[in-house]
Amino acid sequence: MATDDAGESLAEVGEFAVIERLVAGRRQPDAVAVGPGDDAAVLRAADGRTVVSTDMLVQDRHFRLDWSTPHQVGRKSIAQNAADVEAMGARATAFVVAFGAPADTSADLALELADGMWHEAGLLGAGIIGGDLVSAPQWVISVTVLGDLDGREPVRRTGARPGDTVAVCGELGRSAAGYALWHNGIERFDGLLGRHLVPEPPYGQGRVAADAGATAMTDVSDGLLADLGHIADGSGVGIGLRTDALSADRDALAEAAAALDVDPMAWVLGGGEDHALVATFPQAPPNGWTPIGRVLDGPPRVLVDDAAWQGNPGWQSFD
């Protein structure tokens, strides 16, 4: 994991020299007209509209450097922002990053963080086009993602209608399971441990859903129930889930859950940070999407097997 004892510190190298190292040799996508190095970047937006979202990660709240490498933190910071753009039916084109860290942080660690960001952005064909570097008492990473709708209308949380099918694309509960394993010092289940550190959003599937007529969509960042609750509230509908439709996720977590003596369905329904996509469709969902329930008449609520879920529905930022 990360250590601060290698190479020159950020203070020794200096802000602008560090920034030069972070951007040197990076290849920007064609959408970038002006990249890092000027007062601002210039990004082409062929659609004429830009999708924008911002997230912040704070050390020891959203990641731990005794669990994660800086490369993994960088990948996570990009992935969770890209998922927000996917959930609108758009594609991520560029990212702007601000990084705060103690002055004695090794510049090599900042470079490793940037390498992780560029790795994840490269999976999307996107670039990192600017940002800021400041002194802070701990690591703080703020990422803004810019996206293009490519002529589509945005898929919002407000369009679900009674009778729609609720479907998910991507895996659920992995990050929550990994967190519990890390927290309890259980070092087996490498796949789950890794999925807490680096989520795997289903890149490209937001556009697939939009093209298939999705009426509402979001990414699972806070937890399946919590995020479906946002769709229910925004659309003025109820949502009914079936646990038998989520059995593949439950079964994938069963062994780890047994090691911790917990119900794996609690991770599937209430675990966040997987950044799977969940959407509603007036017809059958497209290939790669799994039906898990139906949209009901209001009032807004989310039911699990026709009853209110008694467990934790998901993440709360100020708990």
Image (cartoon, rainbow, N blue to C red):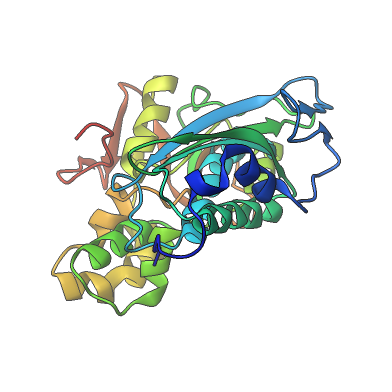
Question: Which residue occupies the foreground of this view, 68 or 234?
Answer: 68
Counting the numbered discs, the total is 0
| Image quadrant where residue 41 sits | top right
Name the residue at 40% across, 60% down: 4
Question: Which residue occupies the foreground of this view, 277 or 159?
Answer: 277
Name the residue at 51% across, 48% down: 12
| Image quadrant where residue 162 sits | top left
The x and y percentages for residue 109 are 50, 57
The x and y percentages for residue 253 are 32, 69
The x and y percentages for residue 89 are 65, 35
Horizontally, residue 77 falls left or right of residue 139, namely right
Horizontally, residue 74 falls left or right of residue 1, namely right
Horizontally, residue 199 falls left or right of residue 14, namely left
* Quadrant showing the C terminus: top left
Q: Is residue 298 above or below residue 225?
A: above
Q: Is residue 171 above or below residue 254?
A: above
Name the residue at 27% across, 42% down: 314
Q: Is residue 189 above or below residue 46?
A: below
Residue 30 visible to the viewer:
yes
Furthest toward the bottom, the residue is 188
Name the residue at 36% across, 68% down: 193
| Image quadrant where residue 254 sits | bottom left
* Quadrant showing the N terminus: bottom left
Residue 201 visible to the viewer:
no
The x and y percentages for residue 100 are 45, 38
